[in-house]
Image (tube, coloured by chain):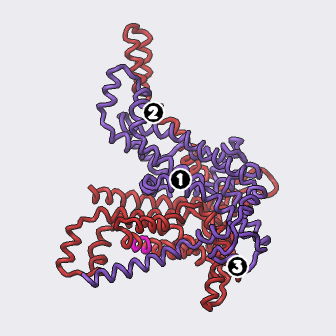
Amino acid sequence: MTSIVAQAQAVAVDGPSRRTLRTRLARRWWPYLLLAPSLVFLAAFTYWPIGRVLWDSFYDKVHGEHTTRFVGFGNYVELFKDEAFRQSVLNNIVYAIGTVPLSMALALLFALALQRSGRLNAVMRALLLFPSMIPLVAAASLFFFIFLPGVGLFDYYLGKFGLPVVNWVGDPDVALWSLIGITVWKNAGYYMLFYLAGLQTLPSEVLEAATIDGANGWQRLRHVVVPLLAPTTSFVLVIALINVLTQVDHVIVLTHGGPANSTKLVLYYIFEQAHENFAYGRAAAASVVSVSVLLALSIFSLKTMERGAHAAS
Amino acid sequence: MRPLKRTSLIVGGLMLVTVFLWSTPFIWTLVASFRPDSGGGIDMASLWPDYKPTWANFAEAFESGDFAVYYLNTAIVAFGILVVQIVTISLAGYAFARLSFPGRDFIFYVFLLQLMLVPPILIVPNLSMIVDLGLYDTLLGVMLPYFASAFGTFLMRQTFRQIPRDFEEAATIDGAHWWQVLWHVLLPMAKPGLVAFSLVSLMAHWNEFLWPLMVLNDPSNQTLTVGLAAFSMGTEGGKEWGLLAAGTLLVMFPLLALFAVFQRQFVNSFMFSGLKG
């Protein structure tokens, strides 16, 4: 900084080289000028909010007034005391365990079954991909009807097979699993794309060698294909985990976190505290917890992606 | 050879059944949306179109749901974000791809981190920001947080890097300024990257729900997803399932049409977008 100022003063004294110096100065600064528009918005809507939410999480609104007061870790203490929040963390864990392995396994199976080119396979791939292209809200609206007790698509057809009527989103023991079902339906086709791409990079000699050595289909899958796809798997895993933390549209449309908090996910809890209960301090504390988990996840994923990049090169 | 063939037949058959089951929600939507009003009867769930198709449900959706306004608002948001993003990501991508300056790697990591810190997680402080800026209940408020895109910057950087420098050098020797080089040489050659990014960006913001739900308040400002949610929660008692199916189809249609046209690019850009979720 000082050297630039010094140079600028030198320019003022030193007439003839003014032009070249000015272009040199411009050249030094204009990379930052090109980045400035992006950096301004990144700062305003990613980095500043992180600081702000951290700050807000230590303050609480005073009842009946517009001021806030410092409460230290009070919001966090209240947060972890709140039965609904603890339930939402637990729900999120169940939701992750229910959606992530199942959708990834289906994605791999779909990719293996449809990897060969051909018109029929292309159509089937597109149909499996469709759910991931529509808004989660639209999916939720459709399932609103599908899950409808008695007349909905599920009960209508399951009833024809003599299966009992289930209250898919009204029964606290079932509702979270219904949401898990929607998520798997929506995401499996998307993750399939990554496995299709991963399968294309597999060296065919290795598979041929395994076949010649007498490995059957299952052994080839278990000992050759799955290990070679490890970089793809860790990449998809990160995406799937981010989705688990950041997608709650179906909760808002279908269940509002109910019945009896059984489908309340953490982000829905945050939304509810901020948007409906106006408990900003607590919403901020819950956001900080979420962001920390996401940051831990991103450090982990940057590492795995670096490894994936090394494996690819 | 024979057992192999039999296995592939079994796999093929299983996949056909699976894909059919996977598609039933779509088949139902299509069938139900053209079904004449049956008063919420038991056969609403039937996947078989045993009726004379009608446009009545669509007409009603447009009248009762204000879908025309929602379409317009969603288009303004999705395309508005895209236009600004193309400017910001082209400039930043160019800087990262072609210029060397102190702190470049550090700033690049600052960008990369945003790939993970997806906006939904920051809805609470971002909403405070929008309120402070006086943009609550405006479409601009919905758009503003997305004007910078780490993913887009990353994509443009990769795209620019793959273009040989000879073209720019020739243009520079001819006396072109950097913005002329960017506009006339680099951007036209970066078209595949731009198309890929545009598809991802349009789809992400067409589909977005939680953020517009928080920022928008006035019914005339709603986007399609927010409108559809209100619509489907409203039909709960009314049993207007044909109407709901038509409304859902209206929301999905532009995306499915876009997919039909740009299938290959879609698949490619979809893969790129992984990190954006």
Residue A306 seen from this side: yes
Rendered location of residue A179, percent (x, y): 60, 73
Name the colour assigned to chain A in the rendering: red
- Dot 3 lies on which element? helix
Cα distance between the residues tagged 2 and 1: 36 Å
Q: Which residue is mark 1?
A: B258
Segment tinted magenta in the rendering:
A105-109
Residue A278 seen from this side: no
Residue B154 drawn above or below residue A303 = above
Give the farthest residue toward the bottom: A162
Crowding at label 3, few (<14), some or many (≥20) Cα neighbours within 10 Å?
Answer: some
Q: Nearer the viewer, residue B28 or A36?
A: B28
Q: Which residue is mark 2?
A: A32
Same chain letter for marks 2 and 3: no
Same chain letter for marks 2 and 1: no
Q: Nearer the viewer, mark 2 or mark 3?
A: 3
Q: Is residue A108 magenta?
A: yes
Give the farthest residue toward the top: A15
Rendered location of residue B270, percent (x, y): 46, 56
Rendered location of residue B129, percent (x, y): 65, 46
Query: Could you tell me which quadrant the N terminus of chain B lies in?
Result: bottom left
Q: Which residue is mark 3?
A: B43
Q: Amino acid at mark 2?
A: Tyr
Q: Nearer the viewer, residue B123 or A284?
A: B123
- Dot 1 lies on which element? helix
Residue A172 drawn above or below residue B194 = below
For image coordinates 71% across by 41% down, the residue present is B134
